Image: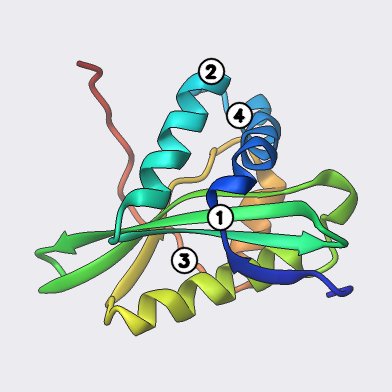
């Protein structure tokens, strides 16, 4: 990876993180981009001790991010880590930034004693699915269901 630094996000990153989420939500049919909602969600993650936002930064600019939240898994009999958002600016894709972000997130999870990481990926995003496969993620027989309140 070319010079990018992976670090925990801080409140000063919110504008750049919302811009990165704009990229992610533009390719995910299940979600609509709403900058106010995304900013609120990011701020909540920053304030929550069982969550983390990691930023990939190059020359003072956020070029990628990922988020993780601890959950309790009955299957694992302990903690698991839900990876919520993984996005890298297009000009930085294919240069190891996503791998570095997820490696750092795995390390954060290991420090919290998680037994499993899990994420949802758009079934039509072949590039993302191939990326996850190449770095050791495995598909499951599960599907995601949701219900809005």
Of callouts 3 and 4, the N-terminal one = 4
Q: Position of residue 36 (x, y in %)?
A: 51, 20
Give the distance between the C-alpha atoms of the residues marked 2 and 4, in whole angstroms.
6 Å
Q: Position of residue 52 (x, y in %)?
A: 43, 60
| Quadrant including the N terminus | bottom right
Give the distance between the C-alpha atoms of the residues marked 3 and 4, in whole angstroms.
23 Å
**Residue at the (33%, 52%) spot, across then down:** 141
How many numbered marks appear? 4
Q: Is residue 122 above or below residue 106?
A: above
- Mark 4 crowdedness (10 Å alpha carbons): few <14, some 14-19, many ≥20: some
Q: Is residue 28 above or below residue 99?
A: above
Residue annotated with mark 3: 138
SS class, disc 4 = helix
Q: Is residue 39 left or right of residue 88?
A: left
Give the distance between the C-alpha atoms of the residues marked 1 and 4, in whole angstroms.
13 Å
SS class, disc 3 = loop
Residue annotated with mark 4: 25
Residue annotated with mark 2: 32
**Residue at the (54%, 18%) spot, across then down:** 34
**Residue at the (50%, 70%) spot, across then down:** 105
Q: Are marks 3 and 4 in contact (CB under 8 Å)?
A: no
Residue annotated with mark 1: 66
Q: Are marks 2 and 4 in contact (CB under 8 Å)?
A: yes
């Amino acid at each position: 990876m070319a010079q990018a630094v992976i670090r925990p996000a801080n409140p000063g990153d919110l504008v750049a993180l919302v811009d990165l989420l704009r990229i992610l939500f533009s390719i995910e049919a299940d979600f609509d981009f709403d900058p106010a909602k995304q900013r609120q969600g990011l701020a909540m993650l920053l304030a929550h001790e069982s969550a983390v936002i990691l930023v990939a930064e190059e020359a003072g600019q956020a070029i990628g991010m990922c988020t993780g939240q601890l959950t309790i898994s009955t299957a694992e009999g302990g903690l698991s880590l839900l990876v919520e958002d993984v996005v890298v600016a297009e000009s930085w894709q294919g240069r190891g930034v996503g791998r570095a972000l997820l490696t750092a997130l795995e390390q954060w999870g290991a420090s919290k004693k998680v037994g499993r990481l899990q994420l949802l990926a758009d079934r039509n995003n072949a590039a993302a699915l191939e990326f996850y496969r190449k770095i050791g993620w495995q598909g499951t027989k599960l599907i995601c269901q949701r219900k809005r309140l």
